[in-house]
Amino acid sequence: MPKINGNEIRPGNVLEHDGGLWAAVKVNHVKPGKGGAFAQVELKNLRDGRKLNERFRSEDKVERVRLDQKDQQFLYETDGKLVFMDSETFEQTELDADLLGDRRPFLQDGMTATIEYYGEEALSVSIPQKVTCKVAETEPVVKGQTAANSYKPAILDNGVRIMIPPFVGEGEDIIVNTEVFEYSERA
């Protein structure tokens, strides 16, 4: 594994630090008036989700870890486990549903997800940024409500609540941005 200097750490880098795997969430380079420059790095543990703030001087060496990414197809959920299949080898992998967090409702049967592995251990699952959902219930359109920024609440077929534009009605398919939980466009 390559070692990098403390000032080369970027957001998104995965580091081996204190015997664990940590993802750099925020990096702030500080040049104090007295003393050497350093990087103030907010780290998130990939195994248990703990957060840590750490200072790395430019002369500090850190192990940078490369994760293997595999696209796998979601098959089904059983007892809090998500079952994915590798589309090349047809091997099935069981992962905790907690790996997806609050994006779990957007996972649909047959969807291709990207799973990051460290050796044989699966660390994270990411789903496509835009997913098509059906509006299950929403308020009817109020006549004269044509203001540009007027949105109304809606519940999607997966149970997630989002705000949608007034022209979208019940039963319509919409595309939702899964990173920010917002309406993107009509399907």
Image (cartoon, rainbow, N blue to C red):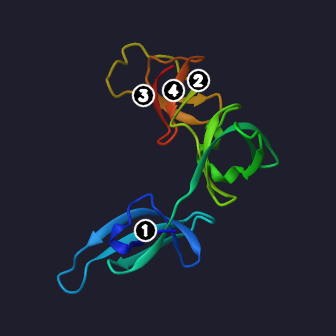
Circle 4 — which element?
A: strand
Residue at image coords 58%, 40%:
127
* Mark 2 neighbour class, 10 Å CA radius: few under 14, some 14 to 19, many 20 or more: many
Q: Earlier in the sequence, mark 1 or mark 3?
A: 1
- How far from the left and from the top, in percent, is residue 162? 52, 34
Residue type at the position of mark 1? Glu
Circle 2 — which element?
A: strand
- The residue lying furthest to the right in this view is 79
Q: CA distance from mark 2 to mark 3?
A: 14 Å
| Residue contact between numbered discs 1 and 3, judged by CB atoms under 8 Å | no
Q: Which mark is residue 42?
A: 1
- How far from the left and from the top, in percent, is residue 138? 56, 24
In the image, taking residue 8 as reference, residue 22 lies left or right, namely right
Q: CA distance from mark 2 to mark 4?
A: 10 Å
Q: Earlier in the sequence, mark 2 or mark 3?
A: 2
- How far from the left and from the top, in percent, is residue 20? 59, 73
Which residue in the protein does label 3 denote? 151
